Amino acid sequence: MESALTITNLTKRYDTGTEALKGVSLTVPAGELFALLGPNGAGKTTIISIVTGLVTKSGGSASIFGFDIDAEPERARALIGLCGQEVNFDPFEKPLDILVNQAGYYGIPRSVAIPRAQRLLKDLGLDDKSGQIGFRLSGGMKRRLMIARALIHEPKFLILDEPTAGVDVELRRSMWDYLQGLTKEGVTILLTTHYLEEAEQLAKHVAIINKGEIVANGTMEEILALHDPSLSTGTSGYSGGKLEEVFVQLTKD
Amino acid sequence: MPPQKQFISFYTILRKGVVRTFRIWSQTLLPSVVTSVLYFAVFGSILGSRIGSLNGVPYILFVVPGLVMLSVITNAYTDVATTFFQSKFFSRNIDEILVSPTPPHVIIAGYVSRGIVRGVMVGLLVLVVSLFFALPSVAHPLIVLLFLVLSSLIFALAGLVNGIYATNFDGITIVPTFVLTPLVYLGGVFYSINSLPPFWQQVSLVNPVLYLINGFRYGFLGFSDVPIITCFTVLTGLILALLALNWYFIRTGLGLKQ
Ligand SMILES: Nc1ncnc2c1ncn2[C@@H]1O[C@H](COP(=O)(O)OP(=O)(O)O)[C@@H](O)[C@H]1O
Ligand SMILES: [Mg+2]
């Protein structure tokens, strides 16, 4: 099976001394939606930032569709679309310009980028906002704009770092539909999320990371099979899914 | 990235900067023109007649090239330093470029070209304004143009080093105030270094601005304190050093990536 992302023994120690990653190995199969789960501070964003070239790694290796991020960074990056955790577009730019400029950084001429950007803005329900500067958009709109920006160069591999954080239920569900549509078109998606029911709905593969180490990794069925009913909180008062129970068991101190 | 795509990325970075320069023209183009008018009025009309001539030319004609250089240098520098720093520190939209396949040399070329466009534009505006105060003779127009571009290039490169390396807002204001401004004022904008005591003449020779102003002045007046070929050689060396430094920063992520 072809892999979209292969990470081997990745380590990261920040200048502050924090050991954010302690030897992470992970494979994201091509063509699937892969959920990377873990509590706050587990190292999810660090993994994503290293893979996309925003943070330098301390050790280990990573490759995108076989292109090593050190040896062939340009070819690796060309295949990735990133929707990061923090809003990071120029607040004085308009959505259409943000998308067209982003396309430019990938070498796509304006004549191709403009219609593509207009279509993406329409698909994500932002077409009436294309002329409004970025910082006037609502939180959900900013998030959708960032997804559109990640898709402007039609990447094979889309990485979404908590795309639905702080997004209302209705919008979240429409985002799910949109992402599922993308996987049907053959786009590989790596998603981090706090909403475990989101992962349970969407993902075929799951990895759980805790304190810089992978504590579980497999298909959704395999992960759910780790569920130990005897440790369950019981029938009364419990509202989460099975995945949530597995998650809690694996990530408790 | 194939050359054609590199060019599109370069053009995108440049275009975004130039659009910004025009959009906020009252912050980018106007201030230097206003200060230059004041300088020309003071030095040309009011003080100039008392100073008389310097190196055989009326003081206003001596000071025009210096003041044009002053505007060019500060504009090229601050344009690149502030836009790069803002996109790295405040909105963090430099990530848009860093995640893309755009190679370091294209990032440098794009940002530096923004600075050159603004520097040259402001330089020409100030030059046009100076015509109202004195009609400078232009001995070597191509040298004038060459030094206009060279000085924007050098200080855009220096501004980029500052923008990449600054870790907080102080870092972006300290260098212009305590390094750039003294270099410019002591580089011979207002005087000929021949009028300095020998010791200070020697000290002035390590100031890159001296070579820029002298080369530029040579283009106008046909003579300068320092031979034109020396100016050119020193400045080329400086450009190569600054290019290498920027390339190293972006390639390794020093100052940019944690
Ligand atoms: N820029 C940074 N400098 C220092 N420490 C950091 C930095 N970014 C993240 N960390 C630390 O690294 C660990 C992992 O963080 P992160 O990857 O953001 O986790 P997650 O995305 O899973 O919430 C945390 O302890 C966090 O405090
Ligand atoms: Mg995170």
Image (cartoon, coloured by chain):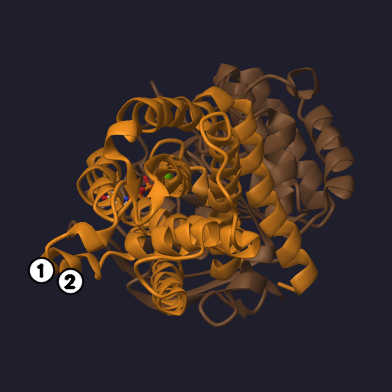
- Which three-letter amino acid code belongs to the residue tagged 2? Gln
Tell me where residue A91 sits by quadrant.
top right
Distance between the alpha carbons at the discs numbered 1 and 2: 5 Å
x and y, in percent, of residue A85 in the image: 48, 41
Q: Quadrant of residue A202?
A: top right
| The C terminus of chain B - image quarter | bottom left
Q: SS for tag 1?
A: helix
Q: Which chain is orange?
A: B
The reply to whether label 1 and label 2 mark residues of one chain is: yes
**Residue A198 numbered mark, or none:** none
Q: Is residue B35 above or below residue B60?
A: above
Task: Give the residue number, with chain letter if any, for mark 1.
Answer: B199
Q: Position of residue B205 (x, y in %)?
A: 25, 70
Horizontal placement of B90 versus A19: left or right? Answer: right
Please say if the residues under marks 1 and 2 sit with CB atoms less than 8 Å apart: yes
* Residue A228 visible in the snapshot: no
Name the foreground residue: A120 vs B229: B229
Q: In the rendering, which numbered label is found on residue B202?
A: 2
Q: Tell which subunit mark 1 falls on.
A: B
Q: Amino acid at mark 1?
A: Phe
Residue at 58% x, 48% y: name it. Answer: B120
Is residue B243 shown above or below A145?
below
**Quadrant where the image shows the N terminus of chain B:** bottom right
Chain in brown in the render: A
Q: Which residue is at the far bottom? A: A71
Give above or below for A26 relative to A160: below
Q: Secondary structure at mark 2?
A: helix
Chain bearing tag 2 is: B
